[in-house]
Image (cartoon, grey):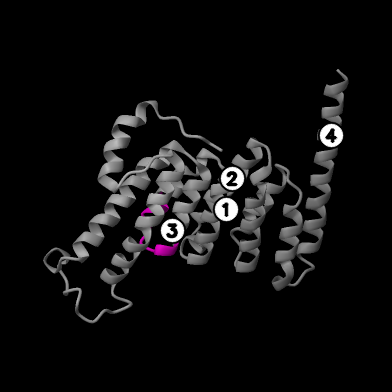
Amino acid sequence: MIVLLMALAFAVQDDAAADEAIAAYDAAYLKTKEGERAALVRTLAQTKHEKVVPKLSAALAVKDKTIRLAAVQGLGGFAEAAPALRLSATKALVAGINLTINATDLEMKDAILAALGPLKDEYAVTTIKINLEDRSLKITATAVTAAVALRSKDLIQPLISLLKESEKTLKAAGNPTLKGKKPVSAKKDANDPEELKVDRAANIIPSAQAALESLTGQKNANGEAWDAWWTKARPNFTLNKD
């Protein structure tokens, strides 16, 4: 009974601290210049509480990018919180990455993906999976890193698919008849979509390989070998979350 009363007292104090932090944030926000509001968001995020999450979530939709980035950093800071809080932070980030203002901004997408992995909540799996297929090397690479940090069995097959697709792209690029464009000896254009695709593939192959090895503890030579191994191992495979 004493333990229960102490827990209830702590919860009341926790609520009181959150209410106080939110009240201070609301009071200061409108009085603070737009370019200085990010600091208020960072201060609010130091209070790890369910009531704070909606405020940080709302900050992901404002015009000022410094505020949005501060909100991402704040929500990512919930990585050491209780599972319920990590889920709330994850849901807020997933909602944020789908907002047009963030979805069309490479820096925001990258920041949100980087924050999602360490929260280690399965709710982020679909978002990470989608971004493994992004055309941008930067976003795909961050999604791979997020997949490793999240450590979900459901991301192993998407990583294998990414590896196979990248190997296929690189193989085709080495054969002008398969590439269907210009010979590889021709002058390259840094903005050529085909060249960017090949560059993405070349950079993703080693990181996808490393990600699969980290998640599974296995080593395989290429995507086909990983696929064959996973077909057999998947039913009984248990991923080490640590």
Q: What span is in magenta?
A: 130-138
Q: Residues within 10 Å of mark 1 (few under 14, many from 20)?
A: many
Label 4 vs label 3, nearer the camera: 3
Magenta stretch holds residue 69? no
Mark 2: amino acid: Leu
Q: Which quadrant is home to the C terminus?
A: top right
Q: How far apart are the two marked residues, 3 and 1, measured between alpha carbons? A: 14 Å
In the rendered image, which residue does mark 4 sit on? 10
Marks 2,1: beta carbons within 8 A: yes
Judge depth for marks 4 and 2 and give the one in front: 2
Disc 2 versus disc 3: nearer the observer: 3
Q: Residue at x 14, y 69 (%)?
A: 176
The residue sitting at 70% across, 65% down in the picture is 38
- Residue 207 screen position, x and y as percent: 41, 55
> Which residue lies under the disc numbered 3?
141
Whether 232 is drawn above or below 195: the answer is: above
Residue 105 seen in the figure = no
Instruction: State the SS at label 3.
Output: helix
Q: Position of residue 66 (x, y in %)?
A: 64, 68
Which numbered mark, 4 or 1, is in the foreground of this view? 1
Residue 158: image x %, image y %? 36, 45
Q: Nearer the viewer, residue 113 or 59?
A: 113
Give residue 14's quadrant in the image: top right
Q: Which residue is mark 2?
A: 119
Would residue 145 appear left or right of 191 to someone viewing this image? right
